[in-house]
Amino acid sequence: MGQTHIQLEAASVAQFLTRTYEYAYDQGWTDGLPVIPPIPEVVEEFIAASGRKGDELIGILPPRKGRATVHVVAVNAVMAGCRPEYMPVIIAAFEGLLDPGYPLELMQMTTNPMTPFLLINGPVRRRLDINSGTGCLGPGWRANATIGRAIRLILINGGRALPGVYSKVSFGSPLRYSYICGENEEENPWTPFHVDRGFKAQDSTVTVFKASNYVNISGGEGVGPDEILRHIATNMPPMYGGGDGALLLLGINHARSLFDAGLTKRDIQQRIWEFARVPVANLAKSFVDTERGAGRGDGKTVWRTRSPDQVYVAISGGAGPQDVYIAAGAPKTRLIGEVTPRGPA
């Protein structure tokens, strides 16, 4: 009798979840994947974990001028499958996304598949088990998957950037589901990314980038620092990304090789900037004219970024001669509020 009762309860729960998902999908509240029902008791738990009041306004979300309150963030974080302690990270990310210098409205409505990329630094990575090492941009880590997904759901439901309605991206991108990792500070031979940006090593921060394409760069090991960097630069030409930034997630093998060769991160920025150029003759005239007018060329070559400062370098990933290039700019870094992880679920 007891087993039958459990089976009936399980069936009822499954029906409830299925109907909730179908309703949410019909309302346009999802990214296409199933969602967790945001029942009030759970939403209140998430609001409490944020350390803020539910009606506190974080900002106004384009394109439909939605009010991004802590309550709105909590509802979508629940739907995304987050844990309550992720709330300070999500809120800090939106404080960066809503910075006047961040092109959020453009990203919400453009035909280009650009999307926010989140880089997490500091002790919060370990407290929340945010993956910074092997497989950090792939599946398998709840924090990475659901924090990034919560960002997208808030942009859809808070800003009403409904795909095909206000969001006019021509092809879309799987990166628009979740795009986040931590910096592998433990295997970084230099200072962490957030310290380079003026924060303390013990601070926990999130940096949001305007990001578009992703390129995994394989090889280039054991040939000396200049050839490693030439190999990387070959995969990050100036034909895409708007010219306002190039994020290099340098793998730990190459980071150690370059460090042992005596290079600083500034050296890497300078050499990448010099190597990642394309002769004017190789480019379409319309592109060259536009980019030269924007100050990214010298009449003979077109540069990947306007200056070495816009080549952003962070250390992530696991072992192997692998690096990642992301066309990414407009970085905004924000402190993450106090996070108190709970015990195992």
Image (cartoon, rainbow, N blue to C red):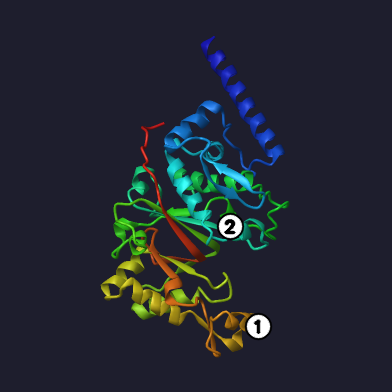
Camera-side mark, 1 or 2: 2
Left or right: residue 29 versus residue 216 is: right
The CA span between labels 1 and 2 is 29 Å
**Can you give x and y, in whole percent of width and height, for residue 292 in the image?**
58, 83
Residue 134 - label: none
Residue 284 - label: 1
At horizontal 70% and vertical 57% (from top left) the residue drawn is 168
Frontmost residue, 209 versus 343: 209
For badge 2, the amino acid type reads Leu
Count of labels in the image: 2
On the image, which quarter does residue 127 sit in?
top left
At horizontal 70% and vertical 60% (from top left) the residue drawn is 170
Left or right: residue 146 versus residue 227 is: right
Q: Which residue is mark 2?
A: 104
At horizontal 44% and vertical 46% (from top left) the residue drawn is 89
Q: Is residue 333 above or below residue 295?
A: above
Looking at the rendered structure, the secondary structure element under dot 2 is helix
**Can you give x and y, in whole percent of width and height, for residue 287 in the image?**
64, 80
Q: Is residue 132 visible?
A: yes
Q: Is residue 338 above or below residue 254?
A: above
**Can you give x and y, in whole percent of width and height, for residue 159 in the image?**
63, 48
For badge 1, the amino acid type reads Ala
On the image, which quarter does residue 39 sit in?
top right
Q: Is residue 117 above or below residue 236?
A: above
On the image, which quarter does residue 24 sit in?
top right
The quadrant of the image that shows the C terminus is top left
